[in-house]
Amino acid sequence: HRTSNRDRNPLERSYSSYNYNYVEPTLEEIKKDVAKAKRKFRHRTSNRDTSTLNHHSKPKSKTSVMVNNILSKNMTDDEIVDEYLFSFEQLVVAEMKVLKECLKKGGAGEQGAKALYGSKAWAVPLFEKRENQQQEYPNGVPSLVTMDDSCYGDTVSSLVPRVQWSELVKRYPHKIINVKNLHLVQSVVGRSLYSLPLEWWYELYPSDDLYLVCNEELKYKTSKTMSDVSDFLGLPTFDFGPVVSKGMYNVGGNNGYDKVTEWKEAGGATGLSTPVNHKKSGDGIPISDELRSQYLSFVKPYNERLFELAKKRCDW
């Protein structure tokens, strides 16, 4: 069996995950609460402005206080996000602190992997092989880890869903973090450490059966990349040009593959060839220069390990 994996610039992936899994769904839920409050207010009082809502309802919860404030100030979406959601930088700082400790040699990531799989018949030879390799090349072969299972921990409380956010919640108790997609929000950085889960794949399957696709290839050389993947999987030859030229699928708010987003709307090229300069001088990611440098330094060893495993490099 053969499989392909698509990876993108880690920082872009982290910021995309932050927006897609935290900001957008949380803002949507807040707006539902606001709309519900407006309906109740209109039902109870006619011919009155919503700014007088605070005279007619006594806040009884964190949510009601928030909704009352949003209505009284007529806050925009951006103002709501700034006031009630944690910033990308705040979540990255909190998570990186946890990951650095968890993923160090002998840390919880490594110990958790052994606790979960150390006695499994299929995993025993994998751990033995790694230990032998590490004795021979102590600085060259990383340990097998279980980041998702071992690094983030369980729920601390309804107010502090993960220990990594304890200090943030204490400093900003009015901000929202206990959201539906906790397993995704907790790992905006971790999901960009592609080599960690792929270490297992490359141990379990022949490297010739695994194929890495860089996101930039799929976006800027779409037709060729799709053909290459198709050839790798042994599928019949197909001309992807006509399909690709129409645009991209499952992007731009159009979930699924039944509606296309035109290239100009998706922010890409034509998908048929690489543009002269597809790298932006500024990526628009709201992160300080200091943290950007720390982030890139943190993920660099994992990037290099990914390229070593896949025997190819991505343009990041």
Image (cartoon, rainbow, N blue to C red):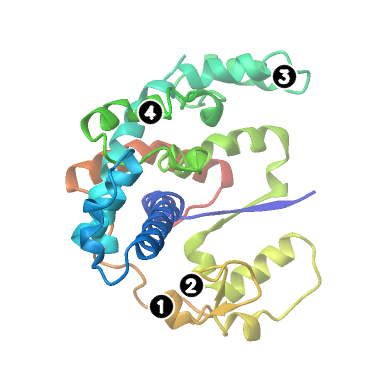
Element carrying mark 4: loop
Q: Residue at x 75, y 51 (%)?
A: 2
Residue placed most toward the observer, 193 or 75? 75
- Image quarter of the C terminus: bottom left
The alpha-carbon separation of the residues under discs 2 and 4 comes to: 41 Å
The residue carrying mark 2 is: 220
Marked residue nearer the N-terminal end (3 or 2): 3
The alpha-carbon separation of the residues under discs 1 and 4 comes to: 45 Å
Contact (Cβ within 8 Å) of mark 1 with mark 2? yes
Contact (Cβ within 8 Å) of mark 3 with mark 1? no
The alpha-carbon separation of the residues under discs 3 and 1 comes to: 46 Å
Marked residue nearer the N-terminal end (1 or 2): 2
The residue carrying mark 3 is: 125
Q: Quadrant of residue 119?
A: top right
Which amino acid is tagged 3? Pro
In this rendering, position of residue 126 left or right of residue 144: right
Q: Is the residue marked by circle 1 packed among few (<14), some (14-19), or many (20+) residues within 10 Å?
A: few
The answer to whether residue 152 is visible is yes
The residue carrying mark 4 is: 160
In this rendering, position of residue 93 left or right of residue 198: left
The residue carrying mark 1 is: 275
Q: Is residue 289 above or below residue 110?
A: below
Q: Is the residue marked by circle 3 packed among few (<14), some (14-19), or many (20+) residues within 10 Å?
A: few
Q: Residue at x 72, y 19 (%)?
A: 125
Which amino acid is tagged 4? Val
Element carrying mark 2: helix
Q: Residue at x 66, y 37 (%)?
A: 201
